[in-house]
Image (cartoon, rainbow, N blue to C red):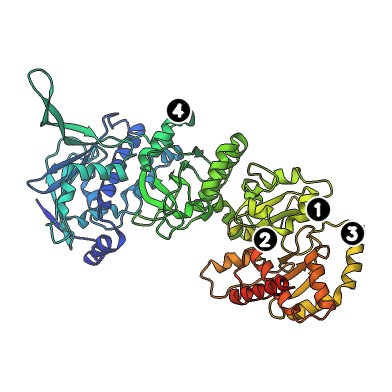
Amino acid sequence: MAETKKFKTESKRLLDLMVNSIYTNREIFLRELISNASDAIDKYHLLSLTDEKLEKRSDYEIHLYVDKKKRTLTITDNGIGMTHDELVDHLGTIASSGSRDFLDKISDENLKKDANIIGQFGVGFYSAFMVAKKVLVETKSPFSDKAYSFASDGTESYTLNEIQKDGVGTSITLFLRDNKDEDKYDEFLSEYTLEELVKKYSDYIRYPIKMEVTESTPKLDKDGKEIENEFDEKKVIKTLNSMIPLWRKGKKEVSEEELKEFYKSKFNDYDDPMRSAYVSVEGLVTYNALLFIPSHAPYNLYSESYERGLKLYAKGVFIMDACKDLVPTYLRFMKGLVDSDDLSLNISREMLQQDKQLKKIADSLEKKMVGELEKMKNGDADKYAEFFKLYGVNLKYGIYESFGSRKDTLKDLILFTSVNQEKPITLKQYVEAMAKDQKVIYYASAKSKDAVKAMPQMDKLKKAGFDVLVLTEDIDEFMLSMMGDYDSKLFKNINQGDLEILSKEEEEKYNLLKDEKKPFLDKIKELLTGKVSDVVLSKRLSDSAVCLVSGEGNVSFGMEKAIANTQAEEKAKADRILELNPNHALFQAIEKAYDTNSANLGEYANLIYSQALLIEGFPLENPVEFANSMNKLLIENASK
């Protein structure tokens, strides 16, 4: 006799919440129902280990049936099934979890750990109403002589009936909603769609998920040759899921080739990854992971549209395509997946609750990937150089954006071009090759090594044989400013402050000459008021006449140019200090103009300042004035 019962909550309101608010993607329903079926089999298997009344079995499976005429989709399992009371308790009461109750009753902690039961909240079943106008559940428990059905349209009530059913287990039949406008529910009757959804969400459920599919083979003529565009079709039962995920196999069982093939198929790449890593961790938080570094950077890696993150699985069930909380920004290029039994999911299992386990996994994965990069650098320098060319800027941002807190983690992974070395070097290699009397690590910002070599500021450094790091990316100087030092060696911009390169004797001579030339230098500074903060004799020039440097401890020219390329409202500007080489003929010519009180002294001052600007790569403030002054002086000299 049929029983009609009301749901044991504000059912209409709560069901609306389940269907319309908790789940954001209606295709999730299949994942939820398959997960419930897997849980039911797990429960039977666990109970059979301790209950002698239950038959020991190995024929567990989940089956999908499609009836296109009736527009129904049925999911069956041969798991534990439900009694009359369990139907009322677990389906008739929204958010009552039979899985959680089951786990609570297991006293053996080892059995509990092996259970791999997914359902925790008791709401997954109701996701069926996102696509179904009616749901029919038929079930039989080994602990009851009778079988029962549960039917509901997902509004306010449900109907229970006693039925005849062979074997224990449960079948859930969805009577699909009518197609309406863009909502085409018939897609869930498509073999291809169902197979793709199983692959996406439930590929690693550990029991076979089977479905009857149409298999096409080319027709053959009487000679056994294929007939073009003609096929024989037959129905076959196909297992849709892989069952045992690669990452849950023993590490020794997984070859590098398997990792490469998995990467290419899972991440739609034609090329092998540059690096693969298998991770299996047990402890306070247990998880498995596969990590990959692509051999080429995605076209949109640095755009807003790029989603960093790893694919996330919980107990083998797909949860999220790109969990960004597992990947720090500086490792945004990393691909892969994580599977853990310990994560706390939200009620819909579509996203994570923020918890300590997630943070621990993220920290562990970061250390693992940094370790892989160190292995690559130490074991294959050329391959690491290739990696750094593709992704090195990310590591630099890792130091800068962490305000130097990742300095010790990443400092030896950064590669630099240098003036004296043919191949990129690390800071460690630079320090090891430093001259005996060299106190600091020199660097310069420019577009290329050749540009640095041509800089006037290199004059005395070249003669001393000191190496200079070439910074070509906007982030470089900001990164070094966050690092502060390396191996107690400070970083020194060759275009900023004192290079600390003169001997004690040379310093004494410099100070005497500086005092002697002070009136001349003050006059040039006066003539360049508003353009430079100071005019000084240079300690770094030997062959060149002039150069422009920035003040010690202030914004450098490299930083100024980098900030100018951003959207920042306030553009920082470096102090400009004009340095003159007292041993150069140009200095002597301008000093003569000063001594003779020449009317052209102002134009000379502006010309050497403009020259210094051009050498430093800055645009002229007044190109027309510069050209007119040049023309005037050339004409005057030519007419003498």
Give how far across and how far down residue 623 sits, in percent: 59, 73
Q: Secondary structure at mark 4?
A: helix
Q: Which residue is mark 2?
A: 481
Q: Earlier in the sequence, mark 1 or mark 4?
A: 4
Determine crowd level at label 2: few under 14, some 14-19, many 20+ residues with C-alpha closer than 10 A: some
Q: Which residue is mark 3?
A: 506
- In the picture, measured across the screen, residue 214 lies left or right of residue 515, that is left
- Which residue occupies 75% across, 73% down? 640
Q: Which residue is mark 1?
A: 439
Q: Secondary structure at mark 2?
A: helix
- Disc 3 vs disc 4: which is toward the camera? 3
- Which residue occupies 41% across, 48% down? 312
Determine crowd level at label 4: few under 14, some 14-19, many 20+ residues with C-alpha closer than 10 A: few
Q: Earlier in the sequence, mark 2 or mark 4?
A: 4
- Which residue occupies 88% across, 64% down? 510
- In the picture, measured across the screen, residue 464 lies left or right of residue 207, that is right
- In the picture, measured across the screen, residue 361 lies left or right of residue 513, that is left
Give how far across and how far down residue 283 sits, in percent: 54, 42
Determine crowd level at label 3: few under 14, some 14-19, many 20+ residues with C-alpha closer than 10 A: few
- Which residue occupies 13% across, 46% down? 162
Q: Earlier in the sequence, mark 3 or mark 4?
A: 4
Determine crowd level at label 1: few under 14, some 14-19, many 20+ residues with C-alpha closer than 10 A: some
Evaluate if marks 2 and 4 touch, with contact meaning CB atoms under 8 Å apart: no
- Disc 2 vs disc 4: which is toward the camera? 2
Amino acid on which disc 3 is placed = Glu
Amino acid on which disc 2 is placed = Ser
- Disc 3 vs disc 1: which is toward the camera? 3
Question: How far apart are the two marked residues, 1 and 4, measured between alpha carbons?
Answer: 52 Å
